[in-house]
Each structure stands twice: as structure tokens, then as C-alpha cells.
Image (cartoon, rainbow, N blue to C red):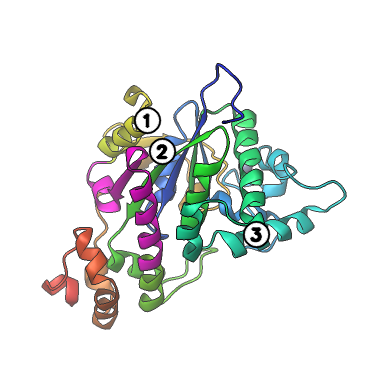
Amino acid sequence: MTNTPSGSAPLKVLCITGWCRNGSTIIGNILNEIPGLFHVGELHFLWKNAAGRGVNEDCGCGRKLVDCPVWSTILPVGQPAGTTLVEHADTVIGRQLSSVRTRHTWRVLRGLRSEQLRAHAALMTEIYQAIAKRTESRVIVDTSKVPGEAALLAYLDGITPYYVHLVRDPRAVAQSWSKPKEYVYAMGPGKSTGYWTGFNLASHAIIKSYPERSMFLRYEDFIADPAGTIDQLLRLIDSDTAANPLTDRTVELHTNHTVTGNPDRFNIGATVIRPSDDSWRTKLPRSAKRTVAALSWPLARRYGYEFGTADGKG
Ligand SMILES: [Zn+2]
């Protein structure tokens, strides 16, 4: 059924889904410190960013993706002979747009029913296997957070996906999106919460489909107990918790090769996971809190976020 050579275990992909600004980059970078685990960042954007069509072209190592010692060897994988990187990237981006957008998630969960999906699945199988070989890893941590790509993972030969549906309070997310951040543009509270709802509904559909290999996680619970949360993630992928690199709240981060993610991904050295940032309570305007509450409350309440308090509604 799979292309896995006899005697070797399938490659594991730990896939974090959910809407942006949810803490996935730092969780990925902590896991990246464990031997055998490799954090690719937001792999979905590899072609877009490498071809200069995205918002940044830099790998977490500080080099351009096309010059990075890891990605320069992965980018040609699956590229038809006689095509340029940009031509190949445009083909991949076209397939992503037509087959693995958030609204396609439910269709992908039902099977690979289009030529575009089958072609994208074949490419991603080759890509993940090439990354594992190049980086000598047995678990790839992918924080793309694109639910359509996450759903596709279940069909890749020789790969066993594990899912983390990561959610953060939509008011904190709206506050985070309210200001531009290096290569990341700003977004209003209505738009942010619209995406928050769509991405979380799609992520929920995925973990419902694969409950035995999935976990629901709130950013706030990670922040309350970072080391305990990393232990939980390691148990999910059947890895030894003794390898957890966090000492209380501190981790020593080394250079990573994340495709993209939160601009904090470039930070290396001793890093402290600080207790919860509640600045949205005072900084997010009342009108924005009302917008977020109106758009998100049924789902947000299901995730344990309370509205209607003085802080919550302004
Ligand atoms: Zn790199």
C-alpha cells in the first residue's frame, strides 16, 4: 500500500492547522531542537516565496530560500526537465489555488477526486520524503496551517500524518493582526475573525476524521504550561518526552530552516516562553471586540473563550 521500504517506519508529519498568529512557529521551533524532528515552517509557501511571488524570500537560516543549503536541494524535486523554477512554481501555486484552499478541505477529506489533487499529492509525497532524507529526520513538523494541505497528507504514500488543531482567542488574534509586522501586513478585526472561523471549522473537520492521531490545543494552554504541552505533542507522535528541550519556560534555539512563519523565527539563543499576553484586553478597541464577538462567539465559546465580561466585550 505504501512506498515505504520494507523494515523502515513510515515518515511522520506533525501538521499544525488553525488560523495564523496562533503560536505555531515557536512550537515548531521548539520541536526542531529535538534530534530526528525537523520544522519546515509553512511549507505551503515554499514555491510562492522561492519564486519571488510571496511576501518574503528568506529561510529561517537568513539566506534566500533558493540559496539555503536545505531548500536549494528540495526545490528541484518534481520540477519537470526543461522548466525554470519560476515556471514550475507557477504550476504548483496554480494547483494549490484550485485544489487545497480552505474551502476545498471537505472535498479533499472525501478523496483525491481531481487530476490537480492527484498531481499535488504526488509532488508532496516526493517533497516530504526528500526533506526527510536531506535532513535525516523521521518526523517533519509542518506549520503551514492550511487545512486543505493538511487533509491531503492522509493520502501521501509512506507518510503518517498527525494533526494538531491549534486555536487562539480570536480577540488576541485580531489585536495581533491590527499592526503590520516586518513582512506581514495588517488586517481588520472582521477579516481576521472571518478567516479564524473558516480555518478553525476546516481544522475541526480534519481532526474529527482522524481522532486517533489528532489533538486539539489552545495557545493559551501552551503558554500556561509550555513544557507540559511539548510533552503532550511528543506523546502524540510516539516520541520520547525525555527529549523535550524546554527547561521550565526556557529553550535554547539554534538556526532553523523554516520556509516562512512569524518573524520571531529568526531569533536564536536562549528564549523564554513568556506567560500570557493579554494586551488585547486594553488595547483592542471596543468596536473591534464587538465585531470579533459577533462573528466568532458560537465557535469561540465551544473552545472555552468567554464573552460578555467587562474585558471581553469592552
Ligand atoms: Zn535555510
Query: Do the numbered discs 2 and 1 sit on residues whose CB atoms are within 8 Å?
Result: yes
Residue holding disc 1: 245
As shown in the figure, which amino acid type bears the numbered disc 2? Ile
- The residue at the point 34 percent across, 70 percent down is 174
Q: Dot 3 lies on which element?
A: helix
As shown in the figure, which amino acid type bears the numbered disc 3? Arg
Residue 304, picture quadrant? bottom left
Residue holding disc 3: 95
Please tell me whether residue 219 belongs to the stretch shown in magenta: yes
Q: Which residues are magenta?
A: 197-225
Camera-nearest label, 2 or 3: 3
Q: Dot 1 lies on which element?
A: loop
50 shown above or below 137: below
Residue holding disc 2: 30
Disc 2 to disc 3, C-alpha distance: 31 Å
Q: Main secondary structure of the magenta part?
A: helix
As shown in the figure, which amino acid type bears the numbered disc 1? Pro
> Is the residue marked by circle 3 packed among few (<14), some (14-19), or many (20+) residues within 10 Å?
some
> Is the residue marked by circle 1 packed among few (<14), some (14-19), or many (20+) residues within 10 Å?
many
